[in-house]
Image: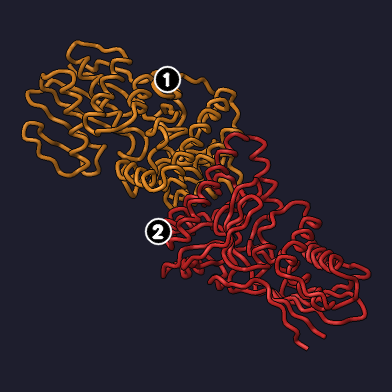
Chain colours: A red, B orange
Amino acid sequence: MIIEASVPLKLTLFGEHAVVYGKPAIAATISEFLKVKVTKSDRFTVVSPSLNLKGVKVNLDDMKVENEQVSRLLNYVSESIKAVGNEPVKVEIESPVEPSVGLGTSAAVIVGTIAAYSTFLGNQLTKEEIAMKSHEVELKVQGIGSRMDTYVESLGGIILFNGNKEERLESKLSFVSGYFKRSMTTAEMLRKVKEFKEKNNNLFSRIIDSIGDLVMEAKEYMVNNDEDGIGRLMYVNHGLLFSMGVTVPEVDEVISRARNVGIKGAKISGGGAGGSVIMTPDPPSAFLLRSFGAYVINASFSEGGVTIKRIR
Amino acid sequence: MIIEASVPLKLTLFGEHAVVYGKPAIAATISEFLKVKVTKSDRFTVVSPSLNLKGVKVNLDDMKVENEQVSRLLNYVSESIKAVGNEPVKVEIESPVEPSVGLGTSAAVIVGTIAAYSTFLGNQLTKEEIAMKSHEVELKVQGIGSRMDTYVESLGGIILFNGNKEERLESKLSFVSGYFKRSMTTAEMLRKVKEFKEKNNNLFSRIIDSIGDLVMEAKEYMVNNDEDGIGRLMYVNHGLLFSMGVTVPEVDEVISRARNVGIKGAKISGGGAGGSVIMTPDPPSAFLLRSFGAYVINASFSEGGVTIKRIR
């Protein structure tokens, strides 16, 4: 029996970083999918030809890993497996994008493994159950982390996260997105932001409060399909993220140039230090991103979250 | 009799734009001086070989002007003259920098004209009186405008403006500065900021409140000669100005690159849309500014404000 889970990747539209400090954020699933295939095997094995540049083939029993990235991937998979059962399987992971570019590939690995493996064991979970279990695994591996990525990738759609509540948003707006190589990991960025908070706590609070307000205004623009308003707030949010120290020159330049040539909105999406950028879908947006070396992805929103099918 | 006033130009260190909405700001005079020479004449004449690219020579009696920039200069001079007396003189203006790059040349023309012309008429004013009269003239010509530029250029030094109060700061810190061509005038920038305020008033308030806090923290770092702290706040302030929409790609890029190469702090100084940039005085700062096409100026602080001497 082979079970395959297809997990939509996600974009953070507004509120990244501030969400770590309890502020609201909006995330949405897009039309790029990470696939996790679970096959019967006599040993636990993880294979991912696309997630890592070199390709990964590791035996979970002796846990030999090539590098930190592989080790992280293995942790996600093995903890996801442990959370569901203990029958040995081969887990194959295929990602349409590089890991750690702000598109939620780590969360997708967890969501996909839990969804596919539980189905493999004959215990089909609801999407809410997948979301909950996935977040538990993420917390176990990372220590911290908002439930945003695992939740939105499990259930799909455009979702406002506000405290412990989720609100599903309907919007006709769309975005163009591309990603850049990152110069730091999300964990390093989170540390950098925390340092700023420790050094200038009052100012830091002011800035994340501003982002909190901005997200709630963005929600209104989203549901009212107000592209001008959304675009305006994208630049404002980017400036606030610049203030928090999570942006890099190439990305600041492409976003500032976008504004200069009249693109309605542009900002980083996700952890920063390179990574993903989103823009309103003005005609030159994708061109501008490519001209700066970004890999443009299919950012049209997707509904439905994780899907599971039996291949054989 | 020839009287010459020498007026130090100024940098806004923190709080530009927010100061227009009642928030505090810090400005300082630098070692670049605009000179205004007043000579006895049978008609009112204004000559400025350096302030305008083409050179200006206009007879105030028939008020023939070549372009908007000249017209603005003439308004400053003629209103300054009117505020002091009515004996005809020739006014010569020599500026070390281009006008409208955020260094306070307009204010310096007013301060210099009032200082030199009043002395010429035998009515030497105190620096406070020069500051007050100059601000009145500025308001008359521009409609709005904070008293920051005219005040700091009249009295000199590093000054915190907070509501109606001024506080003189002592600091051993210094900055490197250069300026870029501007793509919009300060008036246009002010309008753009006002539009943002009208569209997203709550968010706008949050952002300028953040700047207000930041300025008061910057004051502490200034007087404690804490370059790391000042540098950190410079980037934060720049991000907030990015959010307000007053930055342009070249400048965003040079500032983001400065951060990337480890320069402690960098931000725009003044109205934005190009104009002046300040950086902490790390060795590569001036090089980086020049490599982006900026004109580097002598930004070392100057004391004493406007000085007046009789040449003949």
Residue A228, which numbered label? 2
Residue A304, which numbered label? none
* Residue at the spot 75% in from the left edge and 86% down from the top edge: A311
In this rendering, the label closer to the viewer, 2 or 1: 2
Drawn side of residue A103 relative to residue B22, left or right: right
Count residues near mark 2 (Cα–Cα under 10 Å), then give few for <14, some for 14-19, many for 20+. some
Q: How far apart are marks 2 and 1 (CA)?
A: 40 Å
Instruction: Look at mark 1 in the image and give the residue it sits on.
Output: B166
Q: Quadrant of residue A130?
A: bottom right
Q: Nearer the viewer, residue A111 or B94?
A: A111
* Residue at the spot 9% in from the left edge and 36% down from the top edge: B63
Question: Which amino acid does the dot numbered 2 rest on?
Answer: Asp
Cβ atoms under marks 2 and 1 closer than 8 Å: no
Question: Which amino acid does the dot numbered 1 rest on?
Answer: Glu
Q: Judging from the image, what secondary structure is the residue with disc 2 in?
A: helix
Image quadrant in which the N terminus of chain B is located: top left
Q: Height in image: B207 above or below A73?
A: above
Drawn side of residue A182 relative to residue B132, left or right: right
Count residues near mark 1 (Cα–Cα under 10 Å), then give few for <14, some for 14-19, many for 20+. some
Q: Height in image: B5 above or below A10?
A: above
Q: Judging from the image, what secondary structure is the residue with disc 1 in?
A: strand
Residue A55 visible in the shown view? no
Q: Quadrant of residue A11?
A: bottom right
